[in-house]
Amino acid sequence: MVYEGESEGEGESEWQERGYVRLPTFLERGFSDLKHEVIARGRCSMCGTCAAFCEKISIEEGDTEPRFTEGYDTVCGLCYTFCPRTFMPQASIEERIFGRTSDDALGVYRACYEARTRREEIEGQDGGVVTSLLAYGLDTLAIDCAVVTASDSNWRPKVEVARDYETLKASAGTRYTLYPSVIGVREALESDCNAIAFVGLPCQIQGLRKVETANQPYALGVEAVKLLIGLFCTKNYTEGLLDFVNRRVPLDRVRKFDIKGKELRVYKARAEAGGGGEEDVITIPLSELEGFVHEGCSVCTDFTAELADISVGSVGSAEGWSTLITRTERGDELVRGAYESGYIEIKALPESGMEQVRKLAVKKRSHNQEQER
Ligand SMILES: Cc1cc2nc3c(=O)[nH]c(=O)nc-3n(C[C@H](O)[C@H](O)[C@H](O)COP(=O)(O)OP(=O)(O)OC[C@H]3O[C@@H](n4cnc5c(N)ncnc54)[C@H](O)[C@@H]3O)c2cc1C
Ligand code: SF4
Ligand code: SF4
């Protein structure tokens, strides 16, 4: 597999020099290699990319890793090539998507804003910006569906292919548990969506960009994915987190989870909030939750979803606002259109906000590169 801007020979010597694996050639690598080099070594992020683009791989409810479901591995190389944890030709992909690379800890970007929705009915995690941008995209037919991660009444994540405002609104908010959301892209492709938006974590955006940019001979239909919205991410948790919280507050009575600073805040549903001054939120120090951090996150170095069209997070902005980074022309146009049409309000992100984001991006990169050694 050769990425744009690299010849096979060059790639080989460069990777050998750095002590990494040689880039795979088709009919050379298969699921057993993925299993051996990524899954068994605790590097899998459960992004879902391998299962989304190979029907022999599945991740069913309750699975903690991707599984090969057939006896015969054709060793076609797709899963190995698309996985964000086998090799990551970041510079080549940046050149291909953005036309340039960047040394900035924020990655390649065009503009940074503080933003929030103008629609009161959207109960977003921060500024409700992701949901508002998708609503604008659906209304203007820039997209015909959005692959989002919603949850059931017990906060177990589930993927939705949203085609209407009600489904979008129900997906607003953050689920701090792993879910292989990229499999929703397969569902969208199978249901004939032609202009798909995907919202996901940095590892998921990396997987989809690899699928988009890899030079490979199969018709996967990935051109139908028109917009990638990435969420900032420091780490993610296993379902054990939900079981732990459930012992203190029944999950069906939780209205919101939020990680702020060094604590997890669990907001009780409004009906449960007592009168007489009783708090409707409990806080749990993140140090008590370390055992639930997903192993695969320990080697992840991308905080801001550097390969997305648009990245969104909370850090850097005031309470009730989201930090919004546009990276591509497509991303810029969507944000500008949503602003001009009254879906969102935006203001320039102050330098202090940008510095906060940069600081966390550098911290994650240096800490997790260290872990990988
Ligand atoms: C696991 C996780 C860790 C995060 N860590 C940080 C952090 O360290 N610092 C920071 O600044 N921001 C972090 N964020 C981002 C932040 O929580 C908000 O998602 C972001 O600010 C957007 O808020 P919003 O109100 O604009 O989005 P909303 O309008 O509320 O929309 C949220 C969108 O997120 C999607 N989503 C929710 N949960 C998941 C999930 N598990 N996987 C994929 N998509 C999901 C939903 O589909 C929805 O489309 C994290 C998000 C997640 C999911
Ligand atoms: S990181 Fe993603 S693509 Fe790689 S093995 Fe895990 S689920 Fe599959
Ligand atoms: S820390 Fe990295 S690997 Fe873990 S969920 Fe976030 S983006 Fe994915």
Image: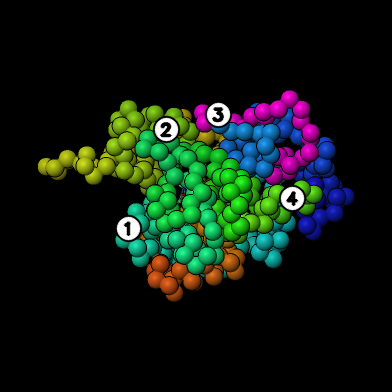
Residue 219 image label: 4
Report the Cα–Cα distance between label 1 and label 3.
35 Å
- Along the horizontal axis of the image, is 53 left or right of 241? right
Give the residue furthest to the top: 71
Does the CB distance between marks 1 and 3 fall below 8 Å? Answer: no
> Dot 1: what SS?
loop
Q: CA distance from mark 2 to mark 3?
A: 16 Å
Instruction: Look at the numbered disc 4 and give the secondary structure of its residue.
Output: loop
Question: What is the CA distance from the residue labelled 1 to the residue labelled 2?
Answer: 29 Å
Label 3 CB-ligand 2 distance < 8 A: no
Percent position of residue 220, x then y: 70, 49
In the image, what residue type sits under mark 3?
Asp
Q: CA distance from mark 4 to mark 1?
A: 40 Å
Neighbours of disc 1 within 10 Å: few (<14), some (14-19), many (20+): few
Separation of marks 4 and 3 at Cα, in angstroms: 28 Å
Task: Give coordinates of residue 163: x percent, y percent.
Answer: 48, 54
| N-term-proximal mark, 4 vs 1 | 1
Read off the magenta span: 61-83
Q: Earlier in the sequence, mark 2 or mark 3?
A: 3
Please name the amino acid that badge 4 sits on: Ala
Label 2 or label 3, whichever lies nearer to me, is 3
Give the residue at mark 3.
63
Instruction: Say which amino acid is labelled 1.
Output: Glu
Q: Secondary structure at mark 3?
A: loop
Residue 142 locus on image (x, y percent): 54, 65
